[in-house]
Image (spheres, rainbow, N blue to C red):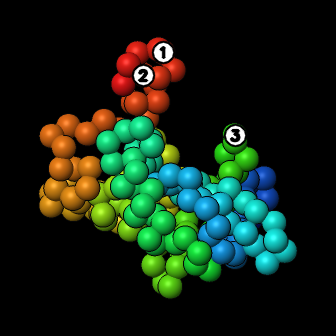
């Protein structure tokens, strides 16, 4: 009796638990806004803004902002890509991982030292991705790649917060 009750409880929990289902979008990257945002055109000629999940790149006016954008251009501009996403942000962008030729472009930005692992949202990543992204950031720091050449680079979320409160960055 207890076993049947436990099984029924598990079944009920699975029924009412929110399901997270990843979606896939295929298309060509037609624009790169910055080091973590692109525009993709799908097979129906619709465009979609994509925010790279798990990373945060320097803003365009920050040191390494232009270099981060150039890096993403080198990786994906004009290329056919697959975007795996399960979230749309408050700006209507799909938040996902860009895959190109078996490579994770988000992860590559971290490896190059041109983005931060966005730990504020790491719980939205799989444990494996969380570990890979953290290790890539640590590796870039250890090798002093990209923005990690600076003694104390300013994280983009701190930069944006300063702009919101009217302080000079």
Disc 3/disc 2 C-alpha distance (Å): 21 Å
Is label 3 in a helix, a strand or a loop? Answer: loop
Residue bearing mark 3: 90
- Which residue is identified by label 1? 165
The image quarter containing residue 79 is bottom right
Labels 2 & 1 near each other (Cβ < 8 A) = yes
- Separation of marks 3 and 1 at Cα, in angstroms: 20 Å
Mark 3 vs mark 1: which is more N-terminal?
3
Q: Is residue 4 left or right of residue 61?
A: right
Compared to residue 51, the image places residue 73 above or below, namely below
Residue at the image point whose x is 78% and y is 53% from the top:
16
Q: Residues within 10 Å of mark 2 (few under 14, many from 20)?
A: few
Residue 93 drawn at (x, y percent): 68, 51
In the picture, which quadrant includes the C terminus? top left
Residue at point 46%, 72% (across, down): 75
Residue count near mark 1 (Cα–Cα under 10 Å), binned few <14, some 14–19, many ≥20? few
> Which label number is shown at residue 102?
none
Asked if residue 159 lies left or right of residue 141, the reply is right
């Amino acid at each position: 009796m207890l076993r049947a009750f436990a099984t029924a409880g598990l079944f009920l929990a699975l029924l009412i638990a929110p399901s997270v289902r990843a979606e896939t979008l295929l298309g060509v990257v037609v624009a790169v806004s910055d080091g973590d945002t692109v525009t993709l055109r799908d097979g129906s000629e619709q465009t979609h803004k994509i925010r790279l999940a798990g990373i945060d790149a320097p803003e365009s006016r920050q040191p390494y902002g232009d270099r981060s954008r150039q890096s993403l251009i080198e990786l994906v501009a004009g290329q056919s890509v697959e975007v795996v996403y399960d979230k749309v942000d408050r700006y209507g962008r799909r938040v996902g991982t860009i895959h190109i030729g078996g490579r994770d472009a988000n992860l590559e930005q971290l490896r190059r030292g041109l983005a931060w692992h966005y730990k504020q949202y790491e719980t939205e990543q799989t444990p494996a991705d969380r570990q890979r992204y953290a290790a890539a950031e640590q590796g870039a720091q250890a090798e002093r790649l990209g923005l990690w050449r600076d003694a104390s680079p300013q994280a983009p979320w701190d930069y944006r917060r300063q702009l919101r409160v009217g302080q000079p960055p």
